[in-house]
Amino acid sequence: MPPSPRPPAPRLIRLTLVTLAIVTVYVVSLRETEIDLPALATGFPNGITLVRDFLTPDVAVRETANSSVGLDFPVPCGSAPEEEVPESGPRIIPSDPCGEVGATIIVEGVGLGAGADVSLWWILQGISDQRLRAARVTTDSEGYFQTTVEIRPIVATKEGKASKLTAEITSEVGVLRPSPALLETVDAAILTVFMALIATSMAAIFAVPLSFLAAANITRHGGFGSAIYYVTRAYLNITRTFEPLVLATIFGLWVGFGAFAGVLALAVFTVGSLGKLYSEAVESIDPGPVEAVRATGAGPVETIFYAVIPQVIPQFTSFSVYHWDINVRISTIIGFVGGGGIGFLLNQRLRTFSYHKAGTAILAIVLVVSLLDFFSAAVRKRAT
């Protein structure tokens, strides 16, 4: 078998140069984007915690009941009378009835209710508005807890008044009910859907006439018609190039940040997108009915009403519903720049590190987008 011919030297050099150029581009890209795989690995535990918080959204709560128990605790011993611990009922029991500064005592809680959140506080010298947190624990199924508490200098007895060691108990009672975070999220989700609906409707009103001006088979006849066609096409292309985030920022500075700014941003962006889709639908119509109507002596307006519009209504409807679905998705993003809706709520919760509540907003976004996706698919199927 004869040996395969070697590639010509110029071709080999060209291939080598192209390979080097590609490698160089990737090396520069990796350096400029600051890819840090070790940071990804070391931050993995925090990432897992964050994902876990997102996957456990705040959707239901029980009503809570608050109560407290406590006793005077002299520091040092003998600086104030010692208080006796009750023998029954909810109570806290320190390992010593008094203590010295810097020492550590064991505090037990008895009869405080199963699964209750307990905050231990030092009420300084018996003054209710001066306090120091000592510990925070949760009781077991028997309403019991045990923890250690450090005796700090600030809790020392002053003028014969001892600080009080107090347990504030928060217990869940009653049945589950929707959490405030869930109710707030539902309101924001409904607002987001309405924002997208109004923006899509406003855009459709302007996009319909523009689509006929941007359709070559309707407008591009003669010099004047061609000029209108190209100007309208240019306008639609320019409108579509504006990012909704940028538009939301502009309108936020113009009319104030909120839902109205978000609606205006979505409407401006949607005019260009729907106008292009509508115009392509007009250009793809069957020319037969148009020629038949024109043969009767009908003018341009009558031709559009009786030969074009009946053909494009199903596609116009389909495109409008589909873009409503798209605008719901976009509105969740423009909320991050103050455009209102559920995106704004999600941004607030992330900024305050309320990740469980942020998970509620994310869950609502997923559900709303999924439902609208099914709805728009069903409408498009019936329209076509």
Image (cartoon, rainbow, N blue to C red):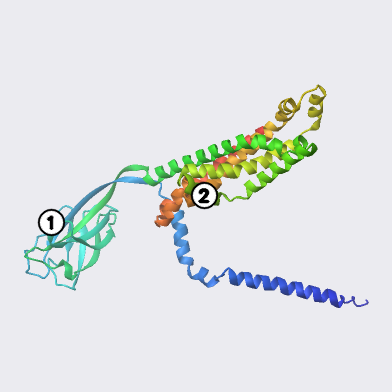
Quadrant of the image occupied by residue 307: top right
Residue placed most toward the observer, 244 or 341: 244
Residue 330 in the image: state x and y as whole percent. 55, 47
| Crowd band around label 1 with a 10 angstrom C-alpha radius: few (<14), some (14–19), many (20+) | few
Quadrant of the image occupied by residue 10: bottom right
Helix, strand or loop at disc 2?
helix
Q: Is residue 206 left or right of residue 103?
A: right
Disc 2: which residue:
250
Does residue 31 appear anywhere in the picture?
A: yes
Disc 1: which residue:
87
In the rendered view, tell whether residue 356 sits above or below residue 125.
above
The residue located at (14%, 72%) in the rendering is 100
Residue 277 in the image: state x and y as whole percent. 68, 41
Across the whole image, how many numbered discs are drawn on residues? 2
Q: Name, please, the residue furthest toward the right.
A: 2
The residue located at (12%, 56%) in the rendering is 87
Q: Which labelled disc corresponds to residue 327?
A: none
Helix, strand or loop at disc 1?
loop
| Crowd band around label 2 with a 10 angstrom C-alpha radius: few (<14), some (14–19), many (20+) | some
Residue placed most toward the observer, 76 or 285: 285
